[in-house]
Image: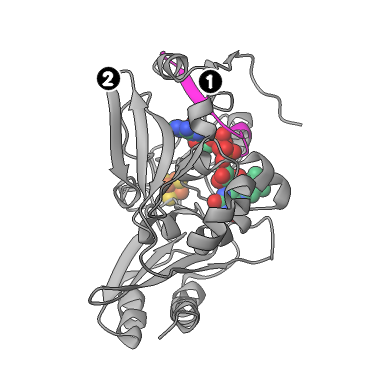
Amino acid sequence: MLPLPLLRWEAPHQLVDLVRLAAEPGARLIAGGTDLVPSMKHRIFRPALLVSTRRVAELRAVAVAADGACSLGAALTLQEVAAHPHVRTAFPALAAACRTVATPTIQHMGTLGGNLMLDTRCMYYNQPAGWRSALGGCLKCEGTLCHVAPRGTGCYAAHSADTVPVLMLLGATARFVTVAGETCVPVAELYTDDGRDGPKLPTGAVLVAVELPPPSRPVVYRKLRQRGAIDYALLLTAVAPAPEGWEAVISAVGPRPVLVSAATRPALIDAVYQAVQPLPTHQQSSTWRKRMLRVEVGRALAALPD
Ligand SMILES: Cc1cc2nc3c(=O)[nH]c(=O)nc-3n(C[C@H](O)[C@H](O)[C@H](O)COP(=O)(O)OP(=O)(O)OC[C@H]3O[C@@H](n4cnc5c(N)ncnc54)[C@H](O)[C@@H]3O)c2cc1C
Ligand code: SF4
């Protein structure tokens, strides 16, 4: 059993208090805690103050406009998002993505906001502190060397949040509040090429809601993983028709999801194969994952209407 360190805990009811507490030095937001708590037990994160998002009404709200646009509070659980009647009918790929996260128990605790803010993952990083220190840490945590690419200077830890590829193709925007005011960022612009970086945000920013525009096109989502539950993805694929052809977002292959577009379906499969270079995982080689890119994009495209 890995213990948590002693720390301060706050669970405000008002958004203004949540934002103020989130801006305190050493503070970190916690929603379901399904990713943060294991990471704290592994001493990856060592916050002095945890601020719970779960009691603030704005973060638990759903608003549906007459045109079908929808605002989903960041502290809604994945299970609540997947079960919402409007999400199920207007954004079925988002409901499907929520239902593939881990297990039903984790979907019951884990939130949409926590999923968007999920840290990147790597087999050398998501380990207990003693395990990491035996290797001398790595560029992302306590060290000076990357064990995946020892001659490189970047970090290739994988972005593995199941909902993000679908949200990108749906044109979703993330609405944040800081002590300085409100800011909206397209989900597609949140992530960077370096696995050491979290989402690009002002310090202390609270994700309040995910804003979905009216549904305008069908999106198909696929998750390739070792087992049918619990496992993170080996490949995440979302595809949709675009004004000048077709688009795909591929994730779980590097620090940020990759958007690829092409004029025809076969060209999209080729373009994804050229654009995406998966790294090996402890389960599968990079060669196998690269081959599976064609298979997964082909299967996703086949599920779209002509
Ligand atoms: C066994 C296991 C398997 C898993 N499998 C998957 C999987 O297959 N796919 C997947 O996507 N995830 C997976 N996860 C990770 C996790 O369960 C989900 O990503 C979940 O959605 C995280 O939400 P949370 O509310 O628990 O986030 P937390 O753990 O509470 O927080 C995660 C991060 O988000 C930040 N955060 C939370 N809310 C906000 C907010 N409102 N504003 C700003 N920052 C915020 C936190 O500070 C923290 O950095 C798995 C976890 C476990 C333990
Ligand atoms: S890819 Fe990133 S997290 Fe993994 S070993 Fe290299 S620096 Fe560390």
Residue 68, position as x, y percentages in the image: 42, 55
Residue stretch rendered in magenta on the structure:
24-37
Q: Point out the frontmost of discs 1 and 2.
A: 2
Mark carried by residue 261 = none
Q: Compare marks 1 and 2 and give the one earlier in the sequence.
A: 1
Q: Is residue 78 above or below residue 300?
A: above
- Residue plotted at (65% across, 53% down): 102
**Residue lying furthest left in this view?**
244
Q: What is the quadrant of the N terminus in the image?
A: top right
User: Three-letter amino acid code at disc 2?
Assistant: Ala
User: Three-letter amino acid code at disc 1?
Assistant: Val
Q: CA distance from mark 1 to mark 2?
A: 19 Å
Question: Dots 1 and 2: beta carbons under 8 Å?
Answer: no
- Residue plotted at (37% across, 53% down): 256
Dot 1 falls on a residue whose secondary structure is strand
Most foreground residue, 121 or 263: 263
| Magenta span includes 34 | yes
Dot 2 falls on a residue whose secondary structure is loop
Going by the image, does 35 lie left or right of 217? right
Going by the image, does 207 lie left or right of 77? left
Residue 252, position as x, y percentages in the image: 47, 59
Going by the image, does 27 lie left or right of 100? left
Going by the image, does 10 lie left or right of 141? right
Residue position for label 2: 180
Residue position for label 1: 51
Residue 99, position as x, y percentages in the image: 62, 57
Residue 237, position as x, y percentages in the image: 46, 68
Q: Is residue 38 above or below residue 101?
A: above
- Residue plotted at (50% across, 66% down): 235
